[in-house]
Amino acid sequence: MSKKLFQRTPVLDGNDVNAKREEIRSYFHTTLDYYEQLFETLRNDEAYYVKPITLRHPLIFYLGHTATFFTNKLILAGLITERINPKVESMFAVGVDEMSWDDLDTTHYDWPSIEEVMTYRRTMRSIVDKLISDTPLTLPITWESPWWTIIMGIEHERIHLETSSVLIRQHALQYVQPHPAWQPCRKSGAAPENQLVTVPAGKVQIGKSNTDPVFGWDNEYGHHSAKIQTFQAGRYLVSNQEFLAFVEANGYGVEDHWEEEGRGWLKHTRAQYPTFWLKQGNEWYFRLMTEEVPMPWDWPVEVNYHEAKAFCNWKAKTSGLPIRLPTEDEWYRLYDVANLSEVPHNAPAAGNIHLDYYASSCPINEFPQGEFFDIVGNVWQWTETPTYPFEGFEVHPHYDDFTTPTFDDRHNLIKGGSWIACGNEALKASRYAFRRHFFQHAGFRYVVTDTPAFQPSSHYETDKLLSEYAEFHYGDTYFDVPNFPAALAKLAISAMGNRPAHKALDLGCASGRATFELAKHFDHVTGVDFSARFINQGVQLVQQGVLRYTLTDEGELVFYKERSLANLGLDDVKHKVEFFQGDACNLKPILTGYDLILAANLIDRLYDPAKFLANVHSRVNPGGLLLLASPYTWLEEHTKREAWIGGFKRDGESFTTLDGLKEILGSHFRLIQGPQEVPFVIRETKRKFQHTLSEVTIWEKIA
C-alpha cells in the first residue's frame, strides 16, 4: 500500500537550527490539518452540538479545546502575553473525565458557531507559526525550553485526534459520513485460533531520562525496573470471534465473572455485548468510525477494562488456567521478545499504527511481530496496572494536571497504540491511562501465569498536616536549617560513644525520619507514635522505599514531591526498622530494654508528661541514654494546666520545664549534655514557614 506517511514526532536535538524550525513548523501544520480533516466526517452542523455520549462534551468542544490549549499554555510559558478570546479560552479549557459511568455533565453552554471556532483556530495557527519563526531556538530542546510547550501543544492535539475519533465512532450514524481520507480496512476472513506462546523470564527497564531527545509526558520520566518470571501470552489479540464464545456463554449475565466495580458498571448499562457490536436479527454487525459493516470476526474485539477482565475470569474458570490481563511490565517484556523498535521516520510501521495503513483496526494476523502479532498497533491493550509515577516523577509546570488526576487507582494503563495512535502515542515509552469503564480503540491480550499482577501504589498524600510533616522529615532544607530529625539522630549517636547500640526507641516518631537515621548505628530501631496516620508514612517507606505527597503553594495550588530512602542513603537500613502505634504515657510492656530512647517534640504534647517521665527509666538499660527535645510549647488543648511540668511560677519564682525535668528524672538519670537549642523549620506554604527552637537535653540512666 503506497501512502504518504503522517509525520512522526520530531527528534529534538541536532545541529541545524533552521532545519529544526521547519520540521517543527511542518509537524504543527500537518497535525492541525489532520485534526480538522477528521471533523469533515461529521455530516452536518447539528453533529457538532449533539453529544455522542452523555458523559462527554459535544464535538464542538473538542474542535475548540485543542486550539485554546495552545493559547493557555503559551501564556503560561510567557511566549505570548495577550489572549485571543478569553471567553472561548475559558469555555474550552477543561474537558470531562467522568468519575463514573453514571456521571452526567449537566452544564449547559452557549457554544460558539463552527465558523467562530474555525476562525479562532486560524488565528491561533498564525500566532504559533510566527512563534516558530521568531522564538530563539537552542538545540537540544529540553523540558525547560519554551519550545517544549510548543511541542506539547502539538502532541496534545494528536491525543485528541484519537479521542475525537472515538466520539465520532460513538455518534449516531445520521451524524457521520464516510471520507476519502479516513478509509477503513476492508479485509476480513476466518479468525485464527489463539495459541499460547511462552515468554522467557527477563528484566525490563522502563522510564525516560531527561536527556531523551524526544518529547514525553511527565509520567514517562523516572526509572522503574522489574524482574519478570516466565509466562505465556496469547499469540494474537482476542478477536471478535474468540470473544463471541464469552457472549454466547452468557458472560454478561453471570456476575461471578465480573469484578465488583465491573458489576456496578454492568448493572447500570445493562450491556449484553461489546459497545461496538450491533445485532440485527441473527446477524452481527460492527461499528466503524463512520459506518456499520458485517462483523469482521478476525479483527480484535474492542471493549473496556471491565469486559476484558470478565472475559479473562471466565476463561480462567472454563480452562483451569491462571489467565489474566498482562501488567505494564509484562507488556514491555513482550515488546522486547518481539524484537520491536520505534516507528521509523521514513518507512511504514511494522504494525497498524500511526495511520500508516487504515482508519480502523484490521485482522489480528496481518502484522507479525516476532512470534506474536500486534504487540504494537491495531488497538490499544488493557493492562492490569493502574497508572502510577515512576521513581523520580515530576510534573511539568505548564501542564501540572496531565497525569496527577489519574493517580487514584481507578485509571488503568493501556499499551501498544491503536491504528490512529500518532506522535508520542506511538512511542514505546508512552503511558496513557483511562478509567476502567472508558471506551477507546482498545482491546486486549491475555497471559497465563501464577505470578500475581504487580499493583504499584500511585498514592500522593494530600492531607495538609501529613504532607507538611513528610516534607519536615524527608524534604528540602529551608533557610539553611539542617533536617531536624536527622540532626537529633546525629546528636544521639555521637553521645552514645562506645555504649552498646543494640536497640533504640524513637518515641513520638511522627513520619519516621529519625527512626531510619538511628538505624545507621543501632541494630534495631522501633518507631512509636500515637498517630497511625503518621506511622503509615514510615511503613510505606519500609515497604515501597518511596513517599509521595503534595505541598501547598498558595490557596488550592499544589505541587507534587517524591522522596525515596535510596536517595537519602537510608535504603540499606530499612530492614532494621519497625513502626508501632502507641501511647507514650501507657507503653506496652514489650517496649523495653533500649540503649537509647529519643523523644522529639513530645513531652509538651502529652496528656500526662510527668507519668511518662517518671516511668521512662524502666524502658532504658543501665548506662543507656534518653534524648529529649522540645520547644516547651505548653498548650491546654494538649496538656491540662495542672499537668504541665514547667513554664509557670512556683513559690513566686519562675519554674522552667528544664527545672521540672531535673526534678522528675533526677532519681534515675543524670544530665550529661545540654541544654542546647536545635532549630527546625516547617513549611506551610510557599511563603509561610514555622521557625522554632527546640531545647535538647541528653540524660544517662544511672546504673
Image (cartoon, rainbow, N blue to C red):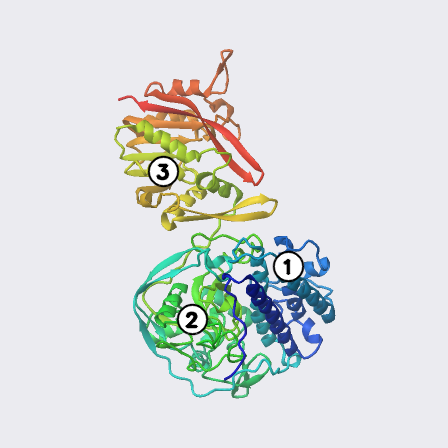
- Which mark is first along the chain, 1 or 3? 1
Relative horizontal placement of residue 680, taking residue 73 as reference (left or right): left
Task: Report which quarter residue 695 is drawn in.
Answer: top left
Between residue 666 and residue 214, name the one nearer to us.
Answer: 214
Q: Is residue 101 in view from this perspective? A: no
The local secondary structure at tag 1 comes to helix
Structural distance between the alpha carbons of marks 3 and 2: 48 Å
- Which mark is first along the chain, 2 or 3? 2
- Identified by mark 3, the residue type is Glu
- Which mark is first along the chain, 1 or 2? 1
Q: Position of residue 688 (x, y in %)?
A: 57, 37
The local crowd at label 2, few if under 14, some if 14 to 19, many if 20 or more residues have their Cα within 10 Å, is many
Instruction: Tell me which residue sits at (71%, 63%) in the image.
Output: 109
Q: Position of residue 243 (x, y in %)?
A: 44, 79
The local secondary structure at tag 3 comes to helix
Between residue 476 and residue 231, name the one nearer to us.
Answer: 476
Structural distance between the alpha carbons of marks 3 and 1: 53 Å
Relative horizontal placement of residue 199, taking residue 693 as reference (left or right): left
Q: Position of residue 315 (x, y in %)?
A: 38, 74
Query: Does residue 477 sit above or below 97 in this rendering?
Result: above
Task: Report which quarter residue 198 is drawn in.
Answer: bottom left
The local secondary structure at tag 2 comes to helix
* Nearest to viewer (mark 3 / mark 1): 1
Number of the label disc, if any, that sits on residue 134: 1
Between residue 235 and residue 294, name the one nearer to us.
Answer: 235
- Identified by mark 2, the residue type is His
Query: Does residue 630 sit above or below 450 in this rendering?
Result: above
Give the labeled residue for mark 2. Answer: 257
Evaluate if marks 3 and 2 touch, with contact meaning CB atoms under 8 Å apart: no
Give the labeled residue for mark 3. Answer: 517
